[in-house]
């Protein structure tokens, strides 16, 4: 066997741990943007899946791209996310008729060996998973389906604008590392040193963004970007579960006046309240993360945050 043959054989055997294709507005692309063709598999508990749900609503695409919401628990760790119609805000798999998310992965990508995650962007026409990467899905919904948005205003929404792309990429990395993943670094740490490092990084990042948001309505100025959505889905869960269950308890979200007002600002956008479900969030985390809460006890507090309280950021930063 030649070295090239050996390399090709090795490449064929390489494990597949992510699926990252792309839907494009171009009708000649492999996955062209079309109304009624695609389906989103979502969890209301998961902040990464909620990014996709946020964008689906914000761009007015709910009648263009169908969705199924999985159960908030995962009683069978091996089979993972489950479809249980009849429970509070959970759906059947109306596209493939499956019981578990794992079955969809196995049907579409039998060579896949990664984690069974949501969101999943699914092509109903080709019966293929397009993407399992939440950031890619968020961007596709933001940029590739403009022809199908409900309103002209929604068509104009671009969370990855040309002149800010480098800044968005840099901020996405910062938020992803220190906050989106940082809360898990705190909650799942098994040695003190790792917890201390994650907690320090997390709260330093929150302190920095508190200062940034004291000077502008959004993280990168006067327009919303992907970075704001990525931050929002973690902040919306902060006091509910990260503060207590994940030991992110140096401060609460409500102790940060600007971060808390920013969270309310995004929450009060039309339809976004549906993407933040307290029951799913507060039931999922204590029940699923048995390594840090072995008995699955759901704690009594803290008191629910009033996401609908006036935030004032529209007038504070008006032109």
Image (cartoon, helix red, strand yellow):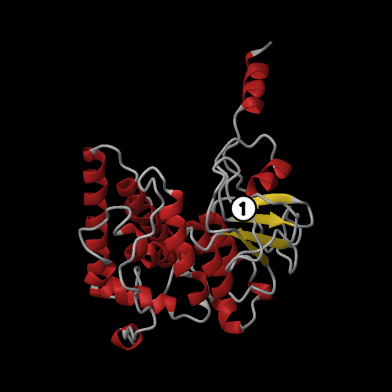
* Residue 163, above or below 28: below
Q: Nearer the viewer, residue 98 or 224?
A: 98
Residue 33: x, y in percent?
70, 64
Quadrant for residue 56, please give it. Answer: bottom right
- The number of callouts visible is 1
Helix, strand or loop at label 1? It is loop
Residue 241: x, y in percent?
36, 60
Residue 248: x, y in percent?
27, 55
Residue 274: x, y in percent?
52, 74
Work out which quarter of the rendered image holds the C terminus and state it: bottom left
Residue depicted at x 29% and y 58%:
244
281 relative position to 98: left or right:
left
Tell which residue pokes out farthest to the top in this image.
1
99 relative position to 190: left or right:
right
Residue 160 at least partly seen: no
Q: Nearer the viewer, residue 108 or 277?
A: 277
Q: Nearer the viewer, residue 308 or 59?
A: 308
Work out which quarter of the rendered image holds the N terminus and state it: top right
* Residue 203, above or below 305: above
Tell which residue pokes out farthest to the right in this image.
125
211 relative position to 55: left or right:
left
Quadrant for residue 2, please give it. Answer: top right
Residue depicted at x 57% and y 73%:
57
Identify the residue position indicated by label 1 in the image: 82
Residue 97 at least partly seen: yes
* Residue 32, above or below 16: below
């Amino acid at each position: 066997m030649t070295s090239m043959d050996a390399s090709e054989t090795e490449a064929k055997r390489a494990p597949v741990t992510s699926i990252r294709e792309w839907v494009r507005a171009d009708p000649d692309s492999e996955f062209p943007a079309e109304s009624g063709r695609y389906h989103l598999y979502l969890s209301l508990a998961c902040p990464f899946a909620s990014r996709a749900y946020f964008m689906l609503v914000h761009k007015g695409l709910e009648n263009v791209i169908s969705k199924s919401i999985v159960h908030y628990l995962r009683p069978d760790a091996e089979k993972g996310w489950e479809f249980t119609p009849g429970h509070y805000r959970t759906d059947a798999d109306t596209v493939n008729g499956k019981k578990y998310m794992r079955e969809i992965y196995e049907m579409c990508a039998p060579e896949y060996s990664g984690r069974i995650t949501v969101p999943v962007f699914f092509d109903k026409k080709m019966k293929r998973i397009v993407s399992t990467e939440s950031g890619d899905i968020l961007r596709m919904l933001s940029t590739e389906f403009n022809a199908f948005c409900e309103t002209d205003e929604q068509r104009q929404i671009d969370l990855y604008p040309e002149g800010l792309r480098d800044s968005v990429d840099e901020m996405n990395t910062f938020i992803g590392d220190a906050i989106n993943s940082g809360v898990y670094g705190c909650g799942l740490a098994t040695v003190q040193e790792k917890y201390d490092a994650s907690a320090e990084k997390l709260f330093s990042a929150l302190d920095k963004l508190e200062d940034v948001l004291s000077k502008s309505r959004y993280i990168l100025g006067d327009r919303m970007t992907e970075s704001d959505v990525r931050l929002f889905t973690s902040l919306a869960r902060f006091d509910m579960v990260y503060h207590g269950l994940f030991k992110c308890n140096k401060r609460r979200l409500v102790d940060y006046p600007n971060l808390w007002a920013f969270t309310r600002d995004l929450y009060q956008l039309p339809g976004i309240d549906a993407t933040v479900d307290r029951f799913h969030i507060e039931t999922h985390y204590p029940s699923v993360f048995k390594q840090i809460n072995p008995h699955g006890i759901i704690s009594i507090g803290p008191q629910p945050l009033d996401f609908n309280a006036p935030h004032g950021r529209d007038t504070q930063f008006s032109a």
